[in-house]
Amino acid sequence: MDSETDMVRQIRSLDSDMQTLVYENYNKFISATDTIRKMKNDFRKMEDEMDRLATNMAVITDFSARISATLQDRHERITKLAGVHALLRKLQFLFELPSRLTKCVELGAYGQAVRYQGRARAVLQQYQHLPSFRAIQDDCQVITARLAQQLRQRFREGGSGAPEQAECVELLLALGEPAEELCEEFLAHARGRLEEELRSLEAELGPSPPAPDVLEFTDRGGSGFVGGLCQVAAAYQELFAAQGPAGAEKLAAFAQELGGRYFALVERRLAQEQGGGDNSLLVRALDRFHRRLRAPGALLAAAGLAEAATEIVERVARERLGHHLHGLRAAFLGCLTDVRQALAAPRLAGKEGPGLAELLTNVASSILSHIKASLAAVHLFTAKEVSFSNKPYFRGEFCSQGVREGLIVGFIRSMCQTAQSFCDSPGEKGGATPPALLLLLSRLCLDYETATISYILTLTDEQFLVQDQSPVTPVSTLCAEARETARRLLTHYVKVQGLVISQMLRKSVETRDWLSTLEPRNVRAVMKRVVEDTTAIDVQVGLLYEEGVRKAQSSDSSKRTFSVYSSSRQQGRYAPSYTPSAPMDTNLLSNIQKLFSERIDVFSPVEFNKVSVLTGIIKISLKTLLECVRLRTFGRYGLQQVQVDCHFLQLYLWRFVADEELVHLLLDEVVASAALRCPDPVPMEPSVVEVICERG
């Protein structure tokens, strides 16, 4: 029963929906019926109107046919009369043509006269066998000849500009004048105008007036000569296109000749800028020069103007690199001159000058700032806004071979060569070089090898994105060259300082009478001077180089005395039982002892530290003292004086060398050599020697 009740409810709902649909559709059906009824009425009226229209069209067609039949004869007559009228108008134009041409020539309307002549030329040529037309043609030819003469006169005067002259040539060509002759005359007149522009540019480069600004000069040349050349080329190609390859070759040769003269003037002006230091104005001028020649380069591809302009820009860039390299070299030499003056001025004025470390810092910073300034200056050639910077040369060769290799690597190698030139033999350039300068340059080159070269080349590679595949100098090669230069300079410094001390020792030995000298009571002043100079050198080297490594020193280094009994070989040599018959035995013992002693290499390689430098200087000095002693003969007191001097040197020099045994061996050799050359070798007591040295 519930289901039935639910079904009844649904049926009622559906009935209600159906009734609603029926009512709605019923209204629509009624509306559609009304519409169809109206359409029937409207179509019935339209059919009536169409019937009336068809009737009217039939009547109109009948009337038209009757009118056409009536006017057929008149239409043919009118057509004939219209043709006759047109022919008469043409004949009237032909008969009036001489007067019209004359009037146009008198009024200067040359273009209108040429157009009249062009309209009538074909007809007169076709009917020239008729006497009347022949007379008209003769009159027109006379007037046309006079017109051509006036056009040529106007063209030859050259007072008008390029567009007016081109118009004259165009009219002459329309009049049938020979194109080849007009081509020659057109180029001749254009040459005159362009040569006048070149003369005005050349006058600006004369000696009397000051040369204009390079940017202003290129602007004048671009607007005057290059602009005129573009107009001439465009007009020529438009007027004489029918000439074909021969005409194009004439134009190319014309542009190539005058362009070469213009380029020569531009190069003369650019050469005057090579002495300047600012590149911004020069690069702007080159940019405008290069941009101006794009248009004629496109119009006259056969003349090669754009390529020639690019070559000029590249050549100027190369010269600019050479100028900056020369400037860097001059700056380096200027820094060396300043160092020389700083080293010499305190000595002359008796004042304390700047230290070597400060001078080294000043020189290094000055050179680095000059290098950075040069890189910034030449970087303008590769700026994106510059028209020629996208050329292959400036993307590749200029960056790699020009800037990196030519400028930076070239300067570093030049700096090394200049520094090595101070290592010449004494008596040449090296003889007048202050030793402190050698020391400073060696440290500068060593610093370049350690860090500066790598920094400079990295900076260069970052600023100039090198795209060239050409081989470049590796950083390791430059560092090796700088290290070798530093080593040579330091070695030469050791030789120079050793030579200075050696000269003092040699003169002190050679100028003294060792046979008749008095008993020693003091250390000779020259030995004190040697110790003082060695100490000063130690301080000087210590300002720039590290200490270095020393061997372990014995506790009695400062207490050892030099006597003929200081070693076993000397005890055997100078025992109290010494007799005149013993020299051969003692010489033999000395030579045998030398076989077992360590050989001393006086000129051994110098390391980059203070101990190695001082060791080299002391070895040279003591070796010189030994050789000078071997050339003299000593008395008893002379031997004792040598003994005192050597002990004094030993007291102070052992602390400067890497191995104190080196000083002991050399001073042993000096005392032994003096004893061998002494007829009466009586040594001084070690205690007395110590007292004299301590008192000294």
Image (cartoon, helix red, strand yellow):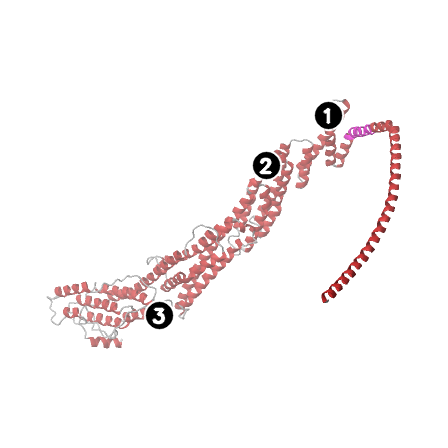
The residue drawn where x is 68% and y is 31% is 176
Can you say whether 315 is above or below 677 in the image?
above
Q: Nearer the viewer, residue 20 or 539?
A: 20
Residue type (three-letter) at the residue carrying disc 1? Gln
Residue assigned mark 3: 539
Q: CA distance from mark 1 to mark 2?
A: 35 Å
Residue assigned mark 1: 126
Q: CA distance from mark 1 to mark 3?
A: 115 Å
Eye-nearest disc, 3 or 2? 2
Check if residue 213 falls in the magenta segment. no
Q: Which residues are magenta?
A: 82-97
Residue 192: where, in percent of width, then height? 62, 40
Residue assigned mark 2: 248
Sooner in the amino-acid sequence: mark 1 or mark 3: 1
Residue 461: where, in percent of width, then height? 47, 56
Residue type (three-letter) at the residue carrying disc 3? Val
Sooner in the amino-acid sequence: mark 3 or mark 2: 2
- Please indicate, yes or no, whether residue 182 appears anywhere in the rendered image: yes
Q: Secondary structure at mark 1?
A: helix
